[in-house]
Amino acid sequence: MGSYDVKQEVTDKYSLRGRVFHKLREDILSGKYEDHEELKEVAIGEELGVSRTPVREAFRQLELEGLIQIIPNKGAYVTGITQKDVKDIYMIRSLLEGLCARWATEHISDEQLEEMEENVYLAKFHAQKGHWEQLAQLDNRFHDIMYEACNSKMLEHQLKEYHEYVLRVRKKTLADEKRGSKSNEEHEQILEAIKAKNAELAEKLANKHMINAYENMVKNGLNEAYKN
């Protein structure tokens, strides 16, 4: 019985730290905290209803991700994402998306393929109607389907992590309605390559899809949003 309690305590501690970390990470990426703003252990602990220990542990993990900087005897400060970080994220993601499309071509199920086809069809409809919010949601789901179809938990996890960073960048740059339609056209090309079992072409198209997304972001205010 005693052994069980110890294990349960460890599990609860990890779970609590995990919840605090993910909440702070989400708040930083959503823009709740400004770049260079100080994160105060006591205030955050009170807000989340936890002690300072899980907050301090979350800070260490956030520092490893480069989202905050802990300065000894001063405090923890939001590092934020620089313009170079954004470019790095997209260049890395373009390679990983390509690999994901290649593996998805080899492992995608009939159900996933059917959902992907429906996704492209619905996105085309919403693009014609000018429903940009629905189009953005479908865009995100298209990538999620591909991540799930690649049959690699490690790759899926990594791509979803990068995607969270990308969502924040999108909010800080201007929306381009034309890009929404163009993006779905590129999704359709990736879909057709996957259906044709052409893994090499699917990889090439998915890679270029991310490059195009980055170039569009630069055109629509990335330089202004990230002057640092």
Image (spheres, helix red, strand yellow):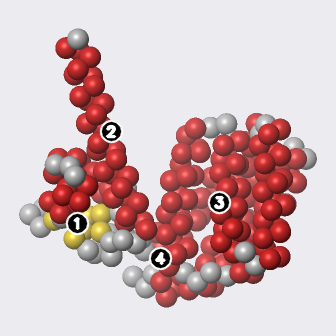
First reached walking from the N terminus: tag 3 or tag 2 = 2
Q: Which mark is residue 39?
A: 1
Q: Which mark is residue 208?
A: none
First reached walking from the N terminus: tag 3 or tag 4 = 4
First reached walking from the N terminus: tag 1 or tag 3 = 1
For the residue carrying disc 3, how many other residues have a C-alpha within 10 Å: few (<14), some (14-19), or many (20+)? few
Q: Which residue is mark 4?
A: 83
Work out which residue is located at the far bottom of the displayed protein and give it.
Answer: 224
Please, what secondary structure does the residue beneath circle 1 have? strand
For the residue carrying disc 4, how many other residues have a C-alpha within 10 Å: few (<14), some (14-19), or many (20+)? some
- Quadrant of the rendered image containing residue 221: bottom right
- Quadrant of the rendered image containing residue 148: top right
The reply to whether the C-beta atoms of the residues labelled 3 and 4 are less than 8 Å apart is no
For the residue carrying disc 1, how many other residues have a C-alpha within 10 Å: few (<14), some (14-19), or many (20+)? some
Type of amino acid at the residue the image marks with label 4: Gln
Callout in the foreground (3, 4): 3
Q: Residue at x 58, y 38 (%)?
A: 153
> Of 91 and 62, which appears nearest the observer?
62
> Of 28 and 69, which appears nearest the observer?
28
Please, what secondary structure does the residue beneath circle 2 have? helix
> Of 149 and 92, which appears nearest the observer?
149
- Picture layout, residue 91 above or below residue 194: below
The reply to whether the C-beta atoms of the residues labelled 2 and 4 are less than 8 Å apart is no
- Picture layout, residue 5 above or below residue 208: above
Image location of residue 102, percent across then percent down: 75, 46
Please, what secondary structure does the residue beneath circle 4 have? helix
